[in-house]
Amino acid sequence: MCFKIPRVIDFEIPADDIERITQFYTTVFGWKIEKWPGPVDHWFLITGDDSELGINGSFAMREDFPEGTTVNVIGVDDVDKYAALVEAHGGQLVGDKIVIPGVGCYRYFKDTEGNLMGMMQ
């Protein structure tokens, strides 16, 4: 992926019970949910047709998130470069860089207001 200007490309909704939350979002909003076949528990949320304005998201297991937190994910061309910029400008890195085989690198951070966010390369 190449990003001229980093922008939100995804969102993550934490869940304790995947079946319950899947039922909620498919029934209420008509979203399509697909389990990612990768090495971690992750489910893709298809929120609409790609020709329409909007982004897709995912469900992730709550253990990595404070209650009530939805994480916006920003697409970047270099996670390490932006991690350094986050720290240099008053943000805080959360956890280690996550390498997702065949996909890229991922990093969580908190902005200057304490909001949990993600970056994906």
Image (spheres, rainbow, N blue to C red):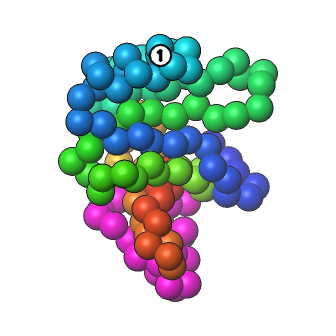
Position of residue 77 in the picture relative to residue 18 (left or right): right
Residue shown at the point (44%, 73%) measured from the top left: 114
Residue shown at the point (46%, 51%) measured from the top left: 71
Q: Quadrant of the N terminus?
A: top right
Position of residue 50 in the picture relative to residue 111 (left or right): right
Can you tell which quarter of the image residue 50 is in?
A: top right
Q: Tell me where the magenta segment starts and ends, as one range.
A: 78-97
In the rendered image, the vertical position of residue 111 relative to residue 43, given as above or below: below
* Nearer to the camera, 5 or 9: 9
* Nearer to the camera, 81 or 92: 92
In the image, residue 87 lies in the stretch drawn in magenta: yes
Spot occupied by residue 3 in the image (x, y as percentages of width and height): 70, 51
Spot occupied by residue 58 in the image (x, y as percentages of width and height): 45, 33
Residue shown at the point (51%, 43%) measured from the top left: 11
* Nearer to the camera, 44 or 105: 44
In the rendered image, the vertical position of residue 52 relative to residue 64, given as above or below: above
Which residue is under mark 1? 26
Count the labels in the image. 1
Please name the amino acid that badge 1 sits on: Thr
Disc 1 is placed on an element classified as helix
Is any atom of residue 5 visible in this view? yes
Spot occupied by residue 81 in the image (x, y as percentages of width and height): 54, 69
In the rendered image, the vertical position of residue 79 relative to residue 24, given as above or below: below
Name the residue furthest front. Answer: 28
Is any atom of residue 40 visible in this view? no
Position of residue 47 in the picture relative to residue 32 (left or right): right
Spot occupied by residue 112 in the image (x, y as percentages of width and height): 51, 79
Residue shown at the point (44%, 42%) measured from the top left: 12
* Nearer to the camera, 68 or 93: 68
Q: Dot 1, how many residues are within 10 Å of its Cα: few (below 14), some (14-19), or many (20+)?
A: some
